[in-house]
Amino acid sequence: MPQYQAFIFDLNGTIIHDMPYHVKVWKDIVNELGANLTLEETQAQCYGKNQDLLERVFPGRFNNEEKDKIGFEKENRYQSWYKNDMKLIAGLDSFLAKAQAANIPMAIGSAAIMFNINFILDGTQTHQYFKSIVSADDVVNSKPDPETFLKNAQTLGIAPENCLVFEDAPKGIEAAQRAGMPAVCITTMHPSADFAAYDNIVAFIDDYNSPELSKFL
């Protein structure tokens, strides 16, 4: 029997390595609006819903309708820039196929809106692997709140402690920890030292070719 009964994947930085694109587009957007942030300062804000990011950078400045408009402008720029570079992180295609063959149900738990999730899953032809998708549109509280991952577990009918989360960001690992879920950390954007505060990490990987993953299948 597999060690875990379900796999839950974050999207950006975990299924595809696109976070540098998001960070650069957000930097352009918020600085056009007067924020004057560096690339590193922008990266530190790149977690949770688009509305949450805008509220952190511009507290009280925009209403929800304005935040949504800015967020869609950001996503349109991101998609236009990233679409020709889209590819799965190395080894993921094989890992997903092996997990499916082992009858391990899989899910997407992301702070992205469905507009972006469908863009990625359509572009990588991976929709068929995921039995549950929870997006920013489906939760009240985004990561690091555990709501996203707990909804995935509920939809799959698997106890949280039996779900293995795949994440690339400290806030995502925190969400998994708060959900009572173990996690595999993929170091696409953050070195392992950035995750020292969390005790739910069962493996660090550079990509899905890592031999560490064989013990979970």
Image (cartoon, rainbow, N blue to C red):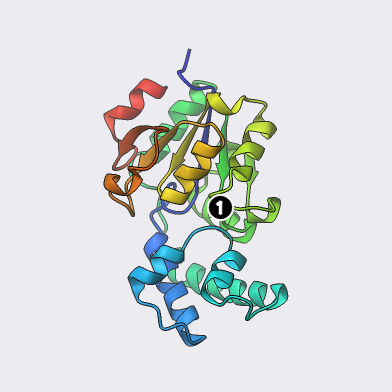
Pick the residue in front: 8 or 90: 8
Q: Quadrant of residue 98?
A: top left
**Along the line of sight, the residue nearer the viewer: 153 or 52:** 52
Is 195 on the left-hand or right-hand side of 134? Answer: left
Q: Is residue 20 visible?
A: yes
In x, y percent, where is residue 74?
A: 54, 73
Residue 133 vertical placement versus 67 (above, below) = above
Number of marks in the image?
1
Q: Position of residue 144 (x, y in %)?
A: 53, 49
Circle 1: element type: helix
Which residue shows up at 35% across the image and 73% down it?
A: 39
Residue toward you, 98 or 140:
140
Relative to 207, is 113 above or below? below
Identify the residue at horizontal 56%, vertical 52% (top origin).
122
* Image spot of residue 168 (x, y percent): 40, 48
Q: Residues within 10 Å of mark 1 (few under 14, many from 20)?
A: few
Q: Mark 1 sits on what residue?
A: 122
Residue 46 in the image: above or below residue 70: above
Front position in the image: 129 or 167: 167
Q: Residue at x 54, y 67 (%)?
A: 53
Task: Please state, as top left, top right, bottom left or bottom right, where the C terminus lies in the image.
Answer: top left
Against 198, residue 79 (above or below) is below
Q: Tell me if 17 is positioned left or right of 181 in this view.
A: left
Q: Is residue 92 left or right of residue 160?
A: left
| Residue 23 picture location, percent across and down | 41, 68
Amino acid at circle 1: Asp
Q: Quadrant of residue 72?
A: bottom right
Quick one: which residue is furthest to the top in this view? 1
Residue 84 in view here: no
Q: Is residue 65 left or right of residue 113?
A: right
